[in-house]
Amino acid sequence: MPSVIHSRGTLLGAPVACGMAILAVAVGFRGENTAAIPGRTATVDLVVVSWHDAGPGTLRDAILAADRLTSPAHIVVKSKRVILESRLPALLNPHGVQLDATPDAGTIDADHQAAGPTLEIDSPHATLRGLRVINAHVCGVMVNAPGAQIESLTVNDSKIGIMVNANSPGTSIRATLLERDETGMLVEAGARDVSLVRDIFVLNTRAGLWFVGAAEAQSADSGRHGDTKARIQVLEGVFEKNATGAVLANRLAVFEKDRFIANRAAVTILGGAARVEDSEIRGSSGAAISVTSGRSVVLARNVLIDNAAAALMIRDSEILIEGNTFRHNGLGIVSIGSRASFTPVIRDNLITQTSADAITLIGGASLLQHNQILQNRGAGLRPLDLVRGDTRLKVAPRLDANVFRGNGVDVVQTSVYRLSGTL
């Protein structure tokens, strides 16, 4: 079945038209506007109507044609399904590529493609809309160029849904569904200015979002309590029933107005800076948020409800926990401090109806200000010296205007938490 190619805007002229004739078999060429418009470059439309891996009217044929153009290209997938047998060429056109699927079309099945990404974006400011990729053995979409715009994409049952490489600043991903992948989205450590808006991460077996860098690079992203520029911004996303919603290490990610529902763990921070604000964290089966060796981590105005284990687990981190609501969790806040240099700040939070203790402090010198700790079944505050072998690290919390009321025990005396080995 033949491809269909036409131009939008100014007619390209005889030399380009002759070049277009060799791009595909049985090509139709049509100009929508015969009037010359100074400064406007025509966009060539390439229509995919075949489900086959190669040949006229296929996605492969359209990408090859788009890559050879000296003007922008618009690929429209009208075939309901595309079945790949081998790796597609990358989108290379330096003038820009739009790749769209019409309604009820555009499912790309990569099950027979043994190697490489299914769609590879090497064209600056390329746009992908409305496509669905399934069964990708490497990744559904790989972004290798700046300014990519991905919208209403679905990637199912793949190893990695979307991979954003370090040389892809300004990538924007909106209203995308990443479901039943091993990792929904993997963002390389050097990536910057990546924007995720209203994306959905569901049932991913490793993580919904993975953004991990080496510890030695953290100084570029670190500051005090959010004085830093975000490498990733995640707005109004939904993370549901993943092994871990988001895994972050040594790169600043900012989450705002997101929902984490019934994940094994909602957010895991393994060093570096991060912000989670105005978000809902509900129904985690393990520790909902865990922070280890964090620098300038901010958790503000979140609601943490019905998490089976600890709502928040901290170890040796510089962290501000402010204005959050903790309700009906297994444990509220657990903070372990084996180094005197870290002072977690816990202020203006409401902690209520916890099944066990509201706040557990093991070693360290946390600052607690203006918190309301009400009607928890265990202790409102349980301070524990950290003992390992012959070494004892005393807990030394500073308390300022907190309210402890209606708890199993409102404030308990300091006890001991023993670990094997040495500190």
Image (cartoon, rainbow, N blue to C red):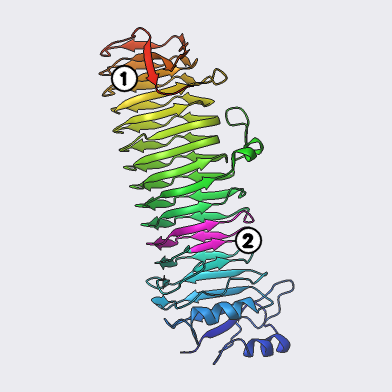
Q: Residue at label 1?
A: 357
- The reply, left or right, for residue 414 in relation to residue 92 is left
The magenta segment:
141-168
Examine the rendered structure and indicate whether residue 283 appears above or below residue 85.
Answer: above
In the shown orientation, is residue 199 left or right of residue 331? Answer: right
- For the N terminus, the image quarter is bottom left
Q: Position of residue 117 (x, y in %)?
A: 51, 66
Give the residue drawn at x 39%, y 46%. 239
SS under mark 1: loop
Eyeballing the image, is 101 above or below 35? above
Q: Are marks 1 and 2 in contact (CB under 8 Å)?
A: no
Dot 1 crowding, Cα within 10 Å, few <14, some 14–19, many 20+ = many
Q: Residues within 10 Å of mark 2 (few under 14, many from 20)?
A: many
* Amino acid type for the residue under numbered disc 1: Asp
Taking the magenta stretch, the answer to whether it contains residue 151 is: yes
Residue drawn at (34%, 43%) of the image: 263
Q: Give amino acid for label 2.
A: Ala
Numbered badge on residue 145:
2
